[in-house]
Image (spheres, helix red, strand yellow):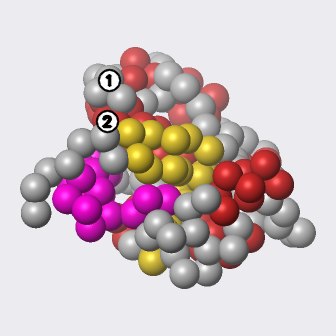
Amino acid sequence: PPRRHGVKVTTVRHLATAWTRDGRLQGRRDEPLLRPAVGDPAVAARLVALRGDPAWCSTLRRTRETADVYGRSDAKASPLLDEIDFGVFEGRTRGELLADTDGRWITDPFATPLGLALKDLEARVLRVVAAVRAGRGPGLIFGHGVWLRLFATIAAGRPRGELNRFNIPPGGVLELEL
């Protein structure tokens, strides 16, 4: 199929878990949402318009549970959307990561030693971008902080190293055009 540009994608970061509440890097740790898991009514209203669009989530329960909270139990679980593996930094705070890497997580994230190289996460993100542009991807993504920031950085055409220069809070929504 021909490559399409100008395709809109809505992304929703998973709702809060105990670790996101405490400012801990969660990565691949499969934590449930805080209970009761309650979505934002304004987000729910925005997502109603996307009922006919394919929805995807990662294979980690916090994105599945977020999709369920927003009435999208039909979201397809894809390992392409799984979060980065923070390795030894998983469970630690962002501040500890910055201190232990001399701030490289902000200034040069692709040189930061993690459990999974950021270039490997980027390869998965680019596969989703290609699927969206080919008309085979989601119109709605329930995802994770680092994954969504890298996706948004690529969608905006910004240098990939800028992915940590902004934040998407738990439950945060971005509307992007690829």
Where is residue 174 shown, x and y percent of the image? Answer: 55, 41
Residue for point 84% across, 63% down: 38
**Secondary element at image label 1:** loop
| Kind of residue at disc 1 | Arg
Up the image or down, 108 lies above or below 75; here it is above
Can you see residue 60?
no
* Residue 138 is inside the magenta segment: yes
Up the image or down, 158 lies above or below 90; here it is above
Categorize mark 1 by other alpha carbons within 10 Å: few (<14), some (14-19), many (20+). few
- Disc assigned to residue 27: none
Can you see residue 174?
yes
Residue for point 78% across, 49% down: 42
Residue lying furthest bottom: 74
Q: Magenta region: which residues?
A: 117-141
5 horizontally vs 164: left or right: left
**Secondary element at image label 2:** helix
Q: Quadrant of the N terminus?
A: bottom left
Categorize mark 2 by other alpha carbons within 10 Å: few (<14), some (14-19), many (20+). some
Q: How many marks?
A: 2
Q: Quadrant of the C terminus?
A: top left
The answer for how far apart the CA atoms under marks 2 and 1 are is: 6 Å
18 horizontally vs 58: left or right: right
Residue for point 47% across, 46% down: 148
- Reading the image, the residue beneath label 1 is 158
Where is residue 39 shown, x and y percent of the image? Answer: 79, 59
Dot 2 and dot 1 residues touching (CB under 8 Å): yes
| Kind of residue at disc 2 | Ile
- Reading the image, the residue beneath label 2 is 154
The residue nearer to you, when weighing 129 against 28, is: 129
Where is residue 32 shown, x and y percent of the image? Answer: 71, 70
Where is residue 102 shown, x and y percent of the image? Answer: 46, 19
Q: Main secondary structure of the magenta part?
A: helix
